[in-house]
Structure formats: structure tokens, C-alpha cells
Amino acid sequence: MSENIPMRNSLTVSKEDYEREVTVQGWVQDVRNLGGISFVILRDPHGILQIAVPKKKVPLEVFEILTSIPRESVIGISGVVKESKQAKMGFEILPNAVEVLGRAASPLPLGVVDKVGVEVETRFNNRFMDLRKPEVRAIFETKSLVLDLIGRYLGEKGFVEVFTPKIVASGAEGGASLFEVKYFDKLAYLAQSPQLYKQMLMSTGLDRVYEVGPAFRAEPSDTVRHVSEFISFDGEMAFISSQRDVMDVIEGCMLHAIKGVLQNGTKQLETLGRHIDLPKTPFPILTYSSVVEVLASEGRQISEGEDLGTEDERTLGEVMKSKGYDMYWIVEYPEGSKPFYIMEKEGTPFSHSFDLDYLGQEIASGGQREHRYDSLVRRMEKKGLEISSFKFYLDAFAYGMPPHGGWGLGVERLVQKMLGLPNIREAILFPRDRNRLTP
């Protein structure tokens, strides 16, 4: 194909190209052979193009290739753009040359535009094909947009992006649900979160940090909200007066992200057929004890100190939705249910902690940390932890640690609820769970 012919795609072909020769490339989505004329629907990342192939008006070789090419093959076509009121795009391309860039095998493992239902495991086994579907790709375009919006917002708030180790000597939660790895001649683990490291950074002068990176949980859960590897959005900030300072940052960040998707992700939302509401502000603040009472009134009985289950969160979400709230805080969890680094609420059995729920599902958790060395050690002993295993962490508290707090937010959970996805795996390119290690 001539290098002098301008390259176009479905987004950039315009009326100015009519009667001009252009080159387009993409996947063969469909071939309709009507005898004397055939039509090839060519799909690229931006949309579709119709290629008209009249037997008497195109080179015989071109006609033979285009009428026999397997679906999902990648081809390049040079041809003249013709106005066509019958074509969905208002134009079609009359080809004079074709190049097969990648011939597809047949039969296909799954259809891209076929209306026939496909098992979810088949889709994940052939993710490369599944991602050719515009509605699937739109999920990850939206996820990318969300992450960009988060980074921009925190950058404007003075946060520094950091990257902490993912191969660690001990777990942030004290050793539970860890993946073991062989680290030369030692035993190590995949990080559950950057919790310990981002807290250590609070003693350095990097007083506002965030990280977006993988986290790992060895929990054999088979639910629509749990996976073994996920992307966690964590932040930590020093010199806070209370956990409310942290909550204000997250609330602002979530509003900025959702507004940004509404403004800049309209194409993706249309592709997904999804409408998003901007959460009503300020987000309501519910105490854990009041949530227990609300759930009891709805027939959900949980013991004081017990964590909220999936059905409990869903029930609470329905109650809050009926009041016009999509996002809301749950604060003051019993200290016994929270990790050692969460500060106890003095004189009470509760803690300076919070969860952020979105449409009936927890998407973030955090609180004020215990920054006082002696109090932190006492909490670790209370939790039955081996203090010597955390020396690297405690050293940062022994030489001047300011009051601080932070959060961890599941990016895929946020995207799942925002886009109304039935399963968190839909928001992960190549999901990992107890049964899936490939592709």
C-alpha cells in the first residue's frame, strides 16, 4: 500500500475525504456476500467502517480476498471514500487494494458482536477476544479515566505519588491471608497493602502520599466482590487534627472522579448504557452502633462488634438509597474489629475508624492511626503480634511521628459499583482468584 495515501480510522474519515483515496486498518467484524456485491464491516478501536465490494468494480483479487476472509482477521484496505446514504456512517469505502495483516483462525473461541450468550469462564479464558467488544473495552477506558482523575486531584492537594515494596517480610494485618513466596533463601510474602510503609513515610516530611498499585489477599473467597489480586488506592496524611481531615480528602476525590467520568466518559457510559448519579453531599456519617440498629429494624441481626456482611451492606445501601444517598460513611467501629494501627477512641470500646460505602458495598476503609510509640506497642501486644517482627516499622515511631491517618480504597470495587457491573472480575483485565491463574 502506498505510503502517500493518508491513513484514516472510523473516527477521522470526514466529508473532506469523499472521492479521495485513504487507507484504513482494523478487524473484519462481518462479511455479507450478496452475490454481485459484498459488504465488509471493518472495526477499529473507534468504531466501524463499511467496505463496499462490488464484483465488477474492484480488482478480482481484492474481491476474492474480502469475500473469503475469516471474521476477526486484521486487514488494511486502500480505497476511495464514497458518500452513501444507505451506509450507517453516511459513507463507504470502495477498495482497490487489500493487505491481510493477521488472518484469524476458525472457528472463533467466542463471537465479538454475536448476540449468543457466552459463559463468563469462556470469556475470561479468551480475554484477548472478549476485550475486542466495545462494551468490555469501555470498562477499562473508564477505569483509566478514574485513575487519572484521582491522580490529578491528589496532586492539586499536595500529595506525592509513591511506590512501596510488594515483596515484604510481614503482613500489614499481622500475617493472615498472605501469599508466601520464596525470596532467595528466605520466606517472604506478597503485600496485602502498603499500610506499614506509607505510615513510616509520615515520619519523613513526605506528609501527604498516595499509591495506586497491586495488593494480594490469599482469601479463598468465591464472591462477586473478592479477588486474589486487585488494585488498591491508598493514601496517608500527617499532622491531622482528626480522621475527618482524611474523610474530607476522600470525599472530595470521589466527587471529582465521578464528575470527571460524567464529563469526559460520556462515550463509554453510552456504550455501556449506564447512567451515573453524582452522590449527594455531604456524605452522611453513620456510627457503627446506629447501623446495627438500622439493620435490626430491617430484620438483619448482627452482634455488636461483628463486621457487616455482604447482605448487611446491601440492606443498608437500600435504606440509604431511599433517603437519596449513594455514598455514606460508617464510623467508630469497635476497636477489637480493627487492625492494630487504628487508634482507639479513649474511654470507649470504639475506634477512630471509618468505611466508605457506595450503593450498598464498602469501597474504602481507613481512620486515624495510633502514632504514639508506647500505645502502638500495647495495641500490637493486645492483638497477639510478635513485636520483634515489626521492628523496621516501629523504628519510624520511636524518633518523632506526627498524628496521621489514611485510607485504602479498592479501585475495581469503585468501578464495579459506578458502572453497575455484576462481578468485580469484569473490572480486571486478567482476574486472579482461587481457580484462575491463567491467562
Image: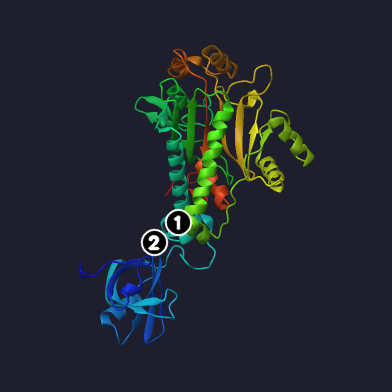
**Residue 265 in the image, given as x and y percentages of width and height:** 48, 54
N-terminal of the pair, mark 2 or mark 1, is 2
Badge 1: few (under 14), some or many (20 or more) residues near its Cα, within 10 Å? some
- On the question of residue 21 being in view, the answer is yes
Secondary structure of residue under mark 1: helix
In front here: 341 or 88? 88
At x 29%, y 83%, the residue is 58
Q: Quadrant of residue 369?
A: top right
Q: Quadrant of the N terminus?
A: bottom left
Residue 348: x and y in percent read 69, 19
Total numbered labels: 2
Mark identifier at residue 137: 1
Q: Which mark is residue 45?
A: 2
x and y percentages locating residue 197 in the rendered image: 44, 26
Q: Position of residue 5 (x, y in %)?
A: 23, 70
* Residue type, mark 1 in image: Arg
Residue drawn 26% across and 68% down? Answer: 6
Query: What's the amino acid at mark 2?
Result: Pro
Q: Is residue 294 left or right of residue 201?
A: right
User: Which residue appears at 46% of the width and 12% of the height?
Assistant: 398
Asked which secondary structure carries label 2, the reply is: loop
For the point 50% across and 57% down, the residue is 266
Q: Residue 76 or 203: which is nearer the viewer?
A: 203
CA gap between label 2 and label 1 equals 9 Å
Asked whether disc 2 touches disc 1, contact meaning CB atoms under 8 Å apart, the reply is: yes
Picture quadrant where residue 56 is located:
bottom left
Is residue 219 visible in the rendered image? The answer is: no
